[in-house]
Image (cartoon, rainbow, N blue to C red):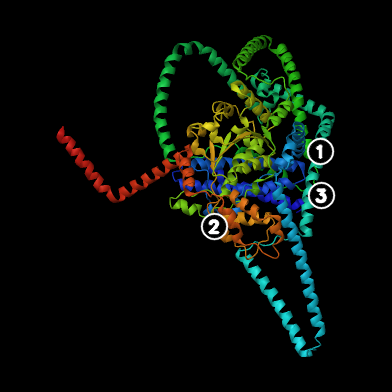
Amino acid sequence: MSQSSYGRMWDAAQGALEYLLEDEYPTMQLHPQKDRMQVFQTLATFYLRYLKIFRALEEVYDQLVHPQKRRVVHQVLEGVMGRLVELKNEMVELEYSEFHYFDDILQDLKMTPEDLEVPIPRYFVREKMRALKEREKMLAHILAKGGRQEENTQVPVQSMSIERAMWLLQVSERARQGRLRAHFMKTIRQEEQRRLQSSSSSILDPDRAATCIQKVWRGYRDRRRVKKECLEEMIFLGMIPAQQPTPTPAQLHAQQLESRRHGMQEEHEAEYQRALANIKESVQCVDGPDIKESLQEQIRQWFIECRDATGKFPDFPSPEDGGSASIFAQKTPEQVAAEFAAKEEEREKKKKSKEDKDKKGNDRKKKKKEKKGKMKGKKGKGDTEEEEKGWKMTPSNFLPTVVEGAKLYKEVWHYRDEKQNFLQSFDAQLVREEKRLEVEEELRVQVDELMRQELKNLKLVVDRDKGKKKKKVKKSSKKKKKKGRKAGKKKKKEKDLTADRTIESLYEELVLEGFIIRPMNVTLSDYIGEYSYLGTTLRQADIEPMPSLSDVRQLIALYGILPLGSQCVHERGPLIRAVLLTGPAGVGKKMLVHALCNETGANLFDLSPSKLAGKYPGKSGLQFLLHIVFKVARQLQPSVIWIGDAEKTFYKKVPKLEKEMEPKRLKKNLPKVLKSIKPEDRVLVVGTTRRPFDADIKPLCKVYKKIILIPRPDYASRFTLWKELLQAGGAQLGPKLDLSSLAKVTDGYTQGHILQAIQTVLNSHRLNQQTKRPLTAVEFIPPLARLDPVYKEEEEAFKTWYSRTPLGKKRARAARASEEEADLKKGKTKGGKLQTKGKEGKNKKRTKKK
């Protein structure tokens, strides 16, 4: 695609965003809505439309070369990312569930389940690739220096007895002799057949020979055609995956162009940065004196106009109020004079009414407070009733940035003709306008100081006495205010336990102790899982479905990758300090942690109880370790702090075998340290556990506010897992390999079980035999039979545990409330008369007793 096509894509995305903003802004001013289903429909449609715009803007930002355009796209892109996270938070608070299903809305918007995938911006890693490579080199150097790399590269050698070795040698030698003898006998038979054929002197009739040749040829042709048609039919039905075609020359050329554009982006950005400095110097030299003179003339003219309107010179605004910039904020001299006159009248009234207010102020304040308290009590009841009945969207922190970016695009770039700018370099005219404003602001400060002196001189000449008194009073009041402010800003600072050490030394210490590790080379797209197509129907039948692996991917992208990758999203979006990934063994919890680090370029810290055992003993040692970890994590952000086996930190009862490890060391200090994570710190604590029911649920949920339950894969996910993992292992998928049967048989098995079975079957010897002996589904059954699946009892244990979490309790309460409302409606329609009769009978009995 060319730059013009990406420009058209940007235009289409901005147009869709403009329509979306028109639809979304009225909802901010509407009354609270009562129908929760309707509210969810509106939130879900907004979420899906923002997701579509986000995908288009991310592609545009990745390929645009123009540096000034890329800044506008980046501003809108970050606003859209933040709005997505906000809408997700709104849906969670509305439905009391981390997982949502959009089947009906996808059908209305003509979208596919693939469009639900949250795209991960490529600039998260690409724009800091140099820093990541340097960090990788430093990590490898420290590991090599500490001798850890050699330990990892050593291959484990198994000891073997002499008898075993002799037996293996005899077996291999006998097999070699057998193969040689078989080959020798085969050559003897072939020679005998040739002799027999040569000795037979029978000559066929030409017609008979022709029919024989035709029969052989037609049989071969028809067999090939039938085989091809069967393969096409199986591919069409989805029984066999289509063969991945080799990329065409056009596709290879497009890939080269994309990589070349990334280099052009760096070149144009360097040119733009040089131009910013050069153009600013030229503006200061050429236009600086003219700007200074025009500012002085404007301020003098304002002095004269105010003098003519009020009869005296005005007070010059202080630097805190904006200086002379506040004077010319689209106001006429008459408006400015009226404002000054109103201010003076207020001052005179205040001076006269000081004594009266001191006497009568207390009585009036008491009466007002009593009235306000009564009014607030009445209003408070009504507000709570409205909040209980209806729902209202919370104000957004990202909509203003989105609106500002859309406005900037419409004013500057929408109608701008760039046909002559073939190379898409920066626009010098726009740079000059921006730098002219910067130079004007810098010169305005100098001009304001000069004009203040000039105004003092004018006041000394015209109104000396008044000017002196006013100035003295103002100076004293300003000084008092400043002193008060300084006294109120005193805060306690935390002690830095490592003030005398550099970040490099602390980083090296953590690497050598094993607390900083290298993440595995996996991405979020490697976490294979399919969309759940029955989620909406199950919820309509009051059955809570188990989440799909596709939903888990979306949550990791929204809660982890987008906030860690973007500083704007982390600062202004909902603050998520800790996330807990829980589920059976083998569902990919650790893989998601490593993918989170690779997608954002984050450092990975390992604070698992097994790593803490025997290191930094005592309370002071643990505080020192946490101080180092979080200090390095903040300095080298983004950072992920992984706590494996998170349930051990909050054990109900520590097992006897683990008492020496002291797994509960972090229980008291972890909540305190989490509170110190501020919005500007891109640090995320991720805990993983496969036995959360062993932990005390209250302290666990206080630390991990976001809990993601990862289930075993369903049928659709198992089918895609078998297909993708077999292809990655080098298997040839043919008609004899029934993937559907494998997906049904492996109900209850996790991704780890499936991967383990594939690795045991697909060894090098079996892969070489595929052409002669194709793979079958039966070969994978024996290795699967040796593994224990996830039984229903374990899955039910996870469900019951999750229902005891704060979000699970809220969902249960909401379900009970909806059931009670439904019962009340039924009671009103059917048994309304009976209820009234019963009440009348009770009232009669009470009157008789009285």
Q: Dividing the image into 4 quarters, which one contains the N terminus? A: bottom right
734 or 436: nearer the eye? 734
In this rendering, the label closer to the viewer, 1 or 3: 1
Expressed as whole percent of the image width and height from the top left, the position of residue 803 reads 46, 41
| Disc with the residue nearer the chain's start (1 vs 3) | 1
Circle 1: residue type: Ala
User: Image quarter for residue 837?
Assistant: top left
| Disc with the residue nearer the chain's start (3 vs 2) | 3
In this rendering, the label closer to the viewer, 2 or 1: 2
User: Image quarter for residue 518?
Assistant: top right
Circle 2: residue type: Val
Q: Dividing the image into 4 quarters, which one contains the C terminus? A: top left
Q: Which residue is mark 3?
A: 422
Residues at marks 1 and 3 touching, judged by CB atoms closer than 8 Å: no
With 12 as the anchor, is 22 left or right in this view? left
The answer to whether residue 734 is visible is yes
Circle 3: residue type: Phe
636 or 761: nearer the eye? 761
Q: Which residue is mark 1?
A: 270
Residues at marks 3 and 2 touching, judged by CB atoms closer than 8 Å: no
| Residue at far left of view | 848
